[in-house]
């Protein structure tokens, strides 16, 4: 379907509560284990979402509206959370994600985005010109990519425990494309 | 990791609230669209989870403890929700899922499952002997498979809207193994 701003707001508004309901107070065995190698834990995924909420999405929307294609977006540091000296625990990250998301959506609403603004373009360093509409659709879809990843990380911890049922559990056959 | 009953309870207890936070009152464009062909909508996935909660998981656990390998499990009708004459709306399904899950977990706790019971075997018509431990681990992992699927169904609706960002959004490259 076409991008629809009301639908984007609706989904963006729900992700923090969904992650909170899924993850808060889960035993460490669920939230602090990864899928092997240098993959992320569920906690690290939420840390990444907090980082994006802090420095990425809204800053890019503003850059499009203020500078168009004349100033490319800043690159995102995907590993910012992992590089923190004292990474915050999951409960704090969930609180911070909810707080930042609500504030960002308030600010986005105050920008009174209409179809003219949605069609405005910014400059992505890899893709070239992209529209505000594409950026906002990506923001919501990026939430889903990481919810997809978290469900896979959790399932992965039981890959042996399920025995022969592994054949029927699609999430255990996911190729990890959403890391 | 090994199956751990407390961890299984913790995850099983959270899924209904997570789906509720994600899906309740979302616009129809999110919840009533599928990934094309005969794939499921988010609403249909929740209908499937309700059906499993009603007829599958707890019934299988009881069959293992009462009949061991002498009586195979009943097959699951994966399309039960789709075949209902008057399929319930999503809000009712979310309520029903939460109610049934809580009741099933209460009943499971009352069964006082210990390591001896976890090792008891039942008979799966395809896999042959399976343990109660494997069944319970599968119950929790099955939740994750369908959360994985729902995140993918929602993302799919914006596969065009995100423009070139599709390259970075792993969920849009998922092969649909979790349907």
Image: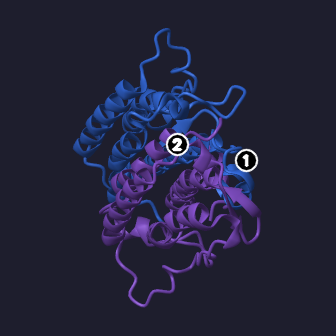
Chain colours: A purple, B blue
State the SS at label 2.
helix
- Of residues A21 and B134, the one nearer the viewer is A21
Please name the residue shown 55% across and 14% down the image. Answer: B83
State the SS at label 1.
loop
Q: Nearer the viewer, mark 1 or mark 2?
A: 2
Image quadrant in which the C terminus of chain A is located: bottom right
Q: Is residue B161 above or below residue A79?
A: above
- Residue beneath label 2, please? A5
Q: Is residue B35 left or right of residue B87?
A: right
The image shows residue B41 at horizontal and vertical percentages of 57, 30
The image shows residue A42 at horizontal and vertical percentages of 47, 66
What is the count of numbered marks?
2
1 and 2 marks on the same chain: no
Please name the residue shown 63% across and 47% down the image. Answer: A170
The image shows residue B110 at horizontal and vertical percentages of 22, 42
Residue A170 visible, this angle: yes
Tell me the number on the disc at residue B175: 1
Image quadrant in which the N terminus of chain A is located: top right
Tell me the number on the disc at residue A147: none
- Verify CB contact (< 8 Å) between mark 1 and mark 2: no
Q: Quadrant of residue A114?
A: top right
- Of residues A73 and B145, the one nearer the viewer is A73
- Of residues A89 and A71, the one nearer the viewer is A71
| Chain under callout 1 | B
Residue B116 visible, this angle: no
Q: Is residue A113 left or right of residue A93?
A: right
């Amino acid at each position: 379907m076409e991008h629809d701003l009301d639908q984007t707001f609706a989904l963006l508004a729900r992700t923090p509560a969904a992650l909170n309901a899924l993850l808060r107070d889960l035993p460490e065995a669920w939230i602090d284990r990864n899928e092997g190698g240098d993959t992320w834990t569920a906690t690290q995924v939420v840390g990444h979402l907090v980082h994006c909420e802090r420095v990425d999405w809204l800053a890019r929307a503003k850059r499009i509206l203020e500078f168009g294609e004349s100033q490319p977006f800043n690159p995102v540091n995907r590993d910012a959370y992992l590089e923190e000296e004292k990474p915050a625990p999951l409960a704090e990250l969930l609180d911070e994600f909810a707080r930042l998301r609500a504030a960002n959506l308030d600010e986005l609403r105050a920008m009174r985005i209409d179809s003219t603004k949605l069609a405005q373009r910014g400059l992505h360093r890899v893709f070239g010109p992209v529209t505000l509409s594409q950026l906002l659709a990506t923001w919501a879809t990026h939430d889903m990519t990481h919810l997809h990843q978290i469900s896979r990380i959790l399932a992965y911890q039981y890959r042996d425990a399920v025995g022969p049922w592994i054949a029927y559990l699609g999430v255990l056959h996911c190729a990890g494309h959403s890391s």
